[in-house]
Image: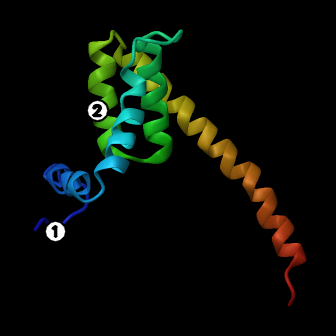
Amino acid sequence: MSSHYYDPTDAKARMEMAELAPSDFKAWMGLNMIPSSDKGAIPVKVRELIAIAVAHATGCPYCIEAHVKKGKAAGVTKQEAAEAVLISAALCAGAAAAHGGLAMKFWDAAEG
């Protein structure tokens, strides 16, 4: 067993979920194919840029790796990937600041 998180061999362990919950896993796999789909109005390159940004917002290293590779194959440039990551960072920071207002509200409402 690995002594650290996010070991590349963890992908094999995830496949156990496919065996234990096959219909749920199949549904998730269907969702997982959306970013790479060429069936919608949004081009695959743009879909993968969105996926790169969201992967960074959610902090999934597996998604980051997968969508950077798929994005590169779809024509995303390194500069575009960097900009997508920084857009994600800006929005995450904005969300934290916006939710900070809730912290102030809860502070004022707390007893003691």
Percent position of residue 61, x then y: 32, 45
Alpha carbon separation for disc pair 2 and 1: 23 Å
Q: Which residue is drawn at 14% across and 51% down?
A: 12
Residue 49's place in the image compared with 52, above or below, is above
Q: Residue tagged by mark 2? A: 66
Q: Residue tagged by mark 1? A: 3
Label 1 sits on a secondary structure element that is: loop
In this rendering, the label closer to the viewer, 2 or 1: 2
For disc 1, the neighbor class at 10 Å (few under 14, some 14 to 19, many from 20) is few
Which amino acid lies under the numbered mark 1 shown in the image of this protein? Ser
Q: Residue at x 42, y 25 (%)?
A: 35
Label 2 sits on a secondary structure element that is: helix
Which amino acid lies under the numbered mark 2 shown in the image of this protein? Ala
Residue 83's place in the image compared with 8, above or below, is above
- Where residue 27 sits, quadrant-wise, is top left
Q: Nearer the viewer, residue 78 or 64?
A: 64
Q: Quadrant of the C terminus?
A: bottom right
Q: Residue at x 72, y 50 (%)?
A: 97
Q: Which residue is drawn at 13% across and 52% down?
A: 9
Percent position of residue 53, x then y: 48, 32
Residue 7's place in the image compared with 89, above or below, is below
Q: Is 87 left or right of 36, judged from the image as shown?
A: right
Q: Which of 58 and 12 is in front in this view?
A: 12
